[in-house]
Image (cartoon, rainbow, N blue to C red):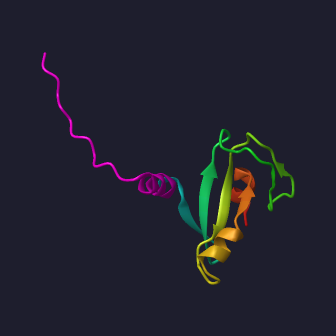
Amino acid sequence: MPRHHRRRPQDDGPDERMERLVAGWRRVEVRRGVEWNVQPVSGASAVKEYVCPGCGRAVEPGTAHLVAWRADGVLGDASDLSGRRHWHAHCWKIGV
């Protein structure tokens, strides 16, 4: 039986592939009139310990969680990114 030849998508550089991957997971949420970028972090990717601003407890290494930062750009993108915080998914869900 003959094989089907499929065209491979045009290969972008590694930066473009990474941007598409990150953009696919990142979403924008509005909380109390403020836009937030929210990106999940898998347990396998979580290698450091953080303090959750929602409950004040540790987000342990190996724990799936969320990273959130402002998306409104009031102080600029660099400032917004430097203000990102790691949240337990449940803490983010119940409120900012």
Q: Residue furthest bottom?
A: 74
- As drawn, is 37 to the left or to the right of 8? right
Q: Quadrant of the N terminus?
A: top left
Q: Residue 69 at x, y = what percent?
A: 66, 67
Residue at the (17%, 28%) spot, across then down: 4
Q: Residue furthest right?
A: 56
State the extent of the magenta-drawn residues as a range: 1-23
Residue at the (73%, 42%) spot, across then down: 63
The answer to whether residue 73 is above or below residue 86 is below
The answer to whether residue 21 is above or below residue 96 is above
**Image-quadrant location for residue 2:** top left
Q: Nearer the viewer, residue 32 or 70?
A: 70
Q: Residue furthest left?
A: 2
Task: Look at the image and say whether residue 15 sits in the magenta stretch.
Answer: yes
Q: Residue furthest top?
A: 1
Task: Look at the image and say whether residue 59 sits in the magenta stretch.
Answer: no
Q: Residue 53 at x, y = what percent?
A: 80, 62
Residue at the (59%, 79%) spot, across then down: 73
Q: Residue 24 at x, y = what percent?
A: 47, 54
Q: Nearer the viewer, residue 63 or 47?
A: 47
